[in-house]
Image (spheres, grey):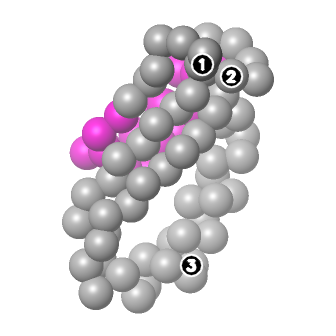
Amino acid sequence: MRADLSIIATRRPRLLPAVFKSFERYIFPKVDIAHVVANVDPVFDSERNQAAAIATIRRYFPTATLFEPDNWL
């Protein structure tokens, strides 16, 4: 089966590797990912962790389309 993957994240880059490793184990063997779209909301932490979250997503999904809202409200 072929599918797109949508990721909704926040400025908590430490959580992402565990999620992605779970995907690698349980989802990716069964689904061919066609495209990845990620939204990283600017809440809970610093701009530094915003950049780290994006870098983590890029490490796992280099061709992902990324969105970063300017304002949470």
User: Where in the figure is residue 23, as x and y percent of width and height?
Assistant: 54, 70
| Secondary structure category for the residue under label 1 | loop
| Span highlighted in magenta in the image | 49-66
Observer-nearest of 69 and 35: 69
Please tell me which residue is depicted at 74% across the width and 19% down the height of the picture. Answer: 45
Disc 2 secondary structure class: loop
Mark 1 and mark 2 in contact? Answer it, CB < 8 Å.
Answer: yes
Q: Position of residue 2 (x, y in %)?
A: 25, 79
Rendered image quadrant of residue 72? top right
State the residue at coordinates (39%, 61%).
Answer: 5
User: Which residue is most to the front?
Assistant: 73
Q: Amino acid at mark 3?
A: Arg
Mark found first going from the N terminus, 1 or 3: 3
> Which residue is more in the foreground, 69 or 36?
69
Q: Residues within 10 Å of mark 2 (few under 14, many from 20)?
A: some
Q: Is residue 51 magenta?
A: yes
Q: Position of residue 18 (x, y in %)?
A: 68, 58
Marker disc for residue 72: 1
Label 3: which residue? 25
Residue situated in front as seen by the camera: 25 or 12: 12
Q: Are marks 1 and 3 in contact (CB under 8 Å)?
A: no
> Does 11 sit above or below residue 61?
above
Q: Which mark is residue 22?
A: none
Q: Which residue is mark 2?
A: 43
Q: Is residue 18 above or below residue 8?
A: below
